[in-house]
DNA sequence: GTTTAGTGGTCTCAAAAAGAGACCAGCACT
DNA sequence: AGTGCTGGTCTCTTTTTGAGACCACTAAAC
């Protein structure tokens, strides 16, 4: 009897601890990270951190992005405030994309991660190869 | 005549500058970043940075991940050397996931980015709202 | 004057990735 | 005998992505 109640209590404690303490479902950071996390987002931010680029330049700079995803990723980055889009009335009209202050601010920590990747990409590739060799 | 040749040369210069100087196609950093960039990867690394967790615990911790993607993301993280997987011969067998040294090393810059997101998520959300209001 | 190329996109259709949920064996507790 | 928990896998559907055609306009080449 007592043990039954105690078990139930213990389970509720654990549940509360989990849902209150460290539930990532409603974490406000998640959707921000998602915006940066897209397959092409960080790459384009990296490019624009160097200098502003035009649409076609970005397309040539990242040859394996489809025009469709380039449009959409730039749109999303603009929506989240990282990227500024400016149309120049040339003929034909040209469009320049550049980082905003928010974008440059975000690039600072992103750059840390990129640097880590530069320093450790051989370690990661070695781990991959070793894993594939044993676990196939 | 001369101008024609000059134009061609100039174009080739520009092309070479682009393809040699800053072509991201064969950048060794890209696939490493991709591994961290997955929708669930950073979230799981964040969780495991706190302490090791078992499969079911992670599933409850991140309620909106499907069991399928949890399995696969953990597999990928293990393959890249960020996560260690250990099976304990309990009944039924339990599986514990923990960060490796490489994983902890990678978490340091990742944490910088997460901190940025914590500090600026309201700015990003405001930008989004403003953008949607005007551009819908 | 007529082809040719470049501008920044959008549209459609196929392929890949992700989500939802059933199912599994084995054991403990009831 | 039924229920639940373990860590997954399998199948089916929906969403996301990729490949490529198309578009109007213009400038320059031929």
Image (tube, coloured by chain):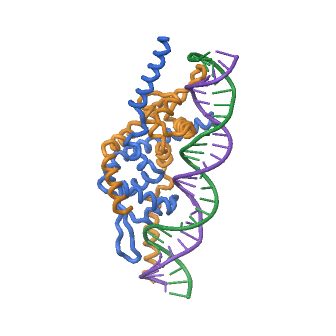
Chain colours: A orange, B blue, C purple, D green
Left or right: A86, with A124 as reference point: right
Q: In the figure, residue C20 lies in which quadrant?
A: bottom right
* Position of residue A86 measured from the top left corner of the image (x, y, whole percent): 55, 26
Residue B127 visible (yes or no): no
Quadrant (top left/top right/bottom left/bottom right) for the C terminus of chain A = bottom left
Left or right: B90, with B65 as reference point: left
Q: Which residue is drawn at 43% across and 29% down?
A: B18
Q: In the figure, residue B16 lies in which quadrant?
A: top left
Could you say which is closer to the camera, residue A130 or residue A118?
A130
* Position of residue B12 measured from the top left corner of the image (x, y, whole percent): 44, 23
Left or right: A42, with B109 as reference point: right
A76 in relation to B86, above or below: above
Could you say which is closer to the camera, residue C30 or residue C6?
C6
Q: Residue at x 44, y 62 (%)?
A: B58
Residue B19 visible (yes or no): yes
* Position of residue B69 measured from the top left corner of the image (x, y, whole percent): 49, 59
A25 in relation to A58, above or below: below
Could you say which is closer to the camera, residue A51 or residue C1?
C1
Which residue is at the far top?
A: B2
| Total numbered badges shown on the rendered structure | 0
Q: Residue at x 46, y 53 (%)?
A: B40
* Position of residue B65 measured from the top left corner of the image (x, y, whole percent): 50, 58
Could you say which is closer to the camera, residue A119 or residue A28?
A119
């Amino acid at each position: 009897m007592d043990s039954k109640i105690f078990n139930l209590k213990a389970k509720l404690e654990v549940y509360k601890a989990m849902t209150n303490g460290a539930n990532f479902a409603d974490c406000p950071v998640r959707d921000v990270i998602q915006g940066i996390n897209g397959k092409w987002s960080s790459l384009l931010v990296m490019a624009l951190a160097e200098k502003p680029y035009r649409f076609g330049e970005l397309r040539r700079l990242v040859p394996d992005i489809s025009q469709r995803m380039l449009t959409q990723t730039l749109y999303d980055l603009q929506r989240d405030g990282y990227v500024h889009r400016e149309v120049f009335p040339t003929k034909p009209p040209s469009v320049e994309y550049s980082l905003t202050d928010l974008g440059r601010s975000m690039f600072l920590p992103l750059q840390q991660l990129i640097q880590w990747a530069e320093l450790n990409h051989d370690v990661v590739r070695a781990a991959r190869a070793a894993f594939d060799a044993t676990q196939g």
